[in-house]
Amino acid sequence: MISCDYFKPSEVGEALRLVSQFKERALFAAGCTNILPDIHSGKQKDCVLIDISDLEELTGISKCGNSMRIGSSTTISELLNSSLIRDEAPLLYEAALNFADPVVRNRATVGGNLAYASPAADMAVPLLALDSRVVVQSLDQGLREISLREFFVGPGETVLSPSELILRVEFNLSQNFKVFYVKVGKRNAMAISLASLGLALKIDQTIKDARLALGALAPTPIRACRTEDFLMGKFPEDKVMEEASEILLSEINPISDIRGSREYRVELTRSLFKRAFRAILSEERGLS
Amino acid sequence: MKNYKLVTIFVNERPVTAPVEPHESLLDFLRHKAGAVEVKCGCNQGDCGTCTVLFKGKAVKSCLVLALQANEKDVRTIKGFTGDFLMGKLQESFVRNGAVQCGFCTPGMLISSYAFLQADPQPTREEIKTAISGNLCRCTGYKKIIDAVEEAAFGEASTKKATSSGSPEISEGQEEAKGTYLLLGGG
C-alpha cells in the first residue's frame, strides 16, 4: 500500500517550511527519474512529495566572476544547451553527453543526481573533479556550503540533514586544464556506469595540478587524492603513468554486481586511467 | 485512505479533469483517465521510451512524470499531431521505409524523432542514433527506423540506396492502410 502526499510550494521558503514539517518522510520531487521507479518497485512507499520542478529560484546557469553557478533543478539537457558549460566546463559537458539518454536528460536534474547519491552518479564525477561546492539551505541551519568531496557518505547517503534543500552547485573556473572524461556501461544509452573517470591535468613541462574523480568504483563517487598527490610535479611520461595507475588501484574499492565483477572493474580502472592520461598528453603535445 | 487530488491536464489541447493519487504517473493518467491508449506502457521505469510524449515542448518519458506535475499543462501524444507537417513527413517516411514492425515502440520513436528534428533538422546518422537511443525497439528494427528519420530530414534520395534492397514491397493500397494505422498511433 503506497501512501504518499504531494505539495507544490511556490517559492523556496515554502518548500523549506514543508520539508521541516515532514522531515524524513519528505522527498523533493523535480525530474522524478529516480522517485517514480522507486515507487513502482516498492522501494518508496510512504513519502510526502514536495514538487520543486517549477521553482525559478532553482534554475539557471550563470557565471559570477570566476565562478560558475548551476541551479539544482537545471536539467542535463539544459547543461548541454548551454554554451557556457560547453566552452568553460568541458568535463561536465562530456559527462552530460553520456548521461542516461536524450529523453531522460530532459527531466533528470543536477541536484537530483547528487542528492540521490548513487555510487555511479554521473554528475558527481565531473563536479568532483571541478572542486564543486554544494549550496544548501534549511530553516534550522540556514544557508551553508558543502564541498562536494565531503558530500557523499555512502550509497544513497549524503551529509544533508533531512530538512535541507540543494539550491545550487558552484565551482571556480580554472584555466589551462586539459580534461578527459570516460564512462563505461553495458550499452551506450540508459547505462548505469560500470566505471567512470574524469581526469584534469595542468601541464607546464611537469604536472602542475592533477584532479582525478571516479564513479562506480567505491561506495561513493570519489577523488583519487593519493594518485593526484603522486602526479604533482612529475614529468608526464609513461613511467609516471604506470606508477600512478598502481596507486590508483589502491584507492578504489569496487563491488561485484550484475554489471561486472570487482576484478573486471579493477582492470578497467587501470586501462581507463591510462587512456585518459595518454589522451591529455597527446592533446598537450598537439598544442605545443 | 486514498489521498486523491484533482488535476486538469490538456491532452492534445483537450482538458481532462480527474482525481489522481500523489504518486500516480502521467502515463497512468493518460492511459487510464484520459483514454489516451496510444501512449504505450512498456517497462514503466524509464528504460524503454515507448511512453514518450511531448511535455512543455520536450520529449519526456511519461512514466517518469508525476500526473500532478502536469497539472494545468499541455501534453501531446502521437494523436495530437494531425496536420503537423514534420510529423506527417516522419510518419510517411516510417511507412515507406518499413520502420514499423510490431508497432509498439512507434509512438515513442516518432515523438523522440520529432522533437529531435525540430531542434536539429539536418542531423548526421550518428546523431539520429543517439537521438533515439532512449527508445527501445524489441523487434530490433533500428536500421529502418534510422533510415526513416534520415529520409524525413533529407528527402527520399538520401536513403534510397540503403533501403532499396531490404525494404518490403508494399502495394499502394496497403501503404495507405498502414499510414492510417500509424496516424492513429496503432498497436
Image (tube, coloured by chain):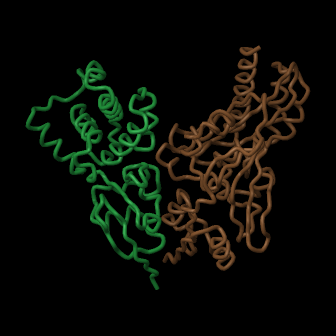
Chain colours: A brown, B green
For the point 74% across and 73% down, the residue is A139
Viewer-nearest residue: A233 or A269: A233
Residue furthest to the right in view is A233
Compared to B46, does A209 lie above or below?
above
Residue B23 left/right relative to A122? left
Q: Position of residue A75 (x, y in %)?
A: 57, 50
Left or right of A30 on screen, residue B3 = left
User: Relative to the observer, which residue lies in front, B137 or A164?
Assistant: A164
Q: Is residue B95 left or right of residue A129?
A: left
Q: Residue at x 71, y 36 (%)?
A: A198
Name which residue lies at 74% across and 33% down. A199
Q: Position of residue A123 (x, y in %)?
A: 65, 46
In the image, residue A236 sits, relative to residue A141, either above or below, namely: above
Q: Position of residue B161 (x, y in %)?
A: 27, 18
Q: Residue at x 89, y 32 (%)?
A: A230
Toward the left, the furthest residue is B173
Q: Is residue A53 above or below residue B89?
A: below
Looking at the figure, which quarter contains the C terminus of chain A? top right
- Residue A42 percent location from the top left of the image: 52, 68
Outermost residue, bottom side = B1
**B83 over A138 or under it: above or below:** above
Res. A38 image quadrant: bottom right
Task: Tell me the quarter of the picture where residue A156 sits.
Answer: bottom right
Query: Looking at the image, how many numbered discs can be counted on the residues?
Result: 0
**Quarter assignment of residue A16:** bottom right
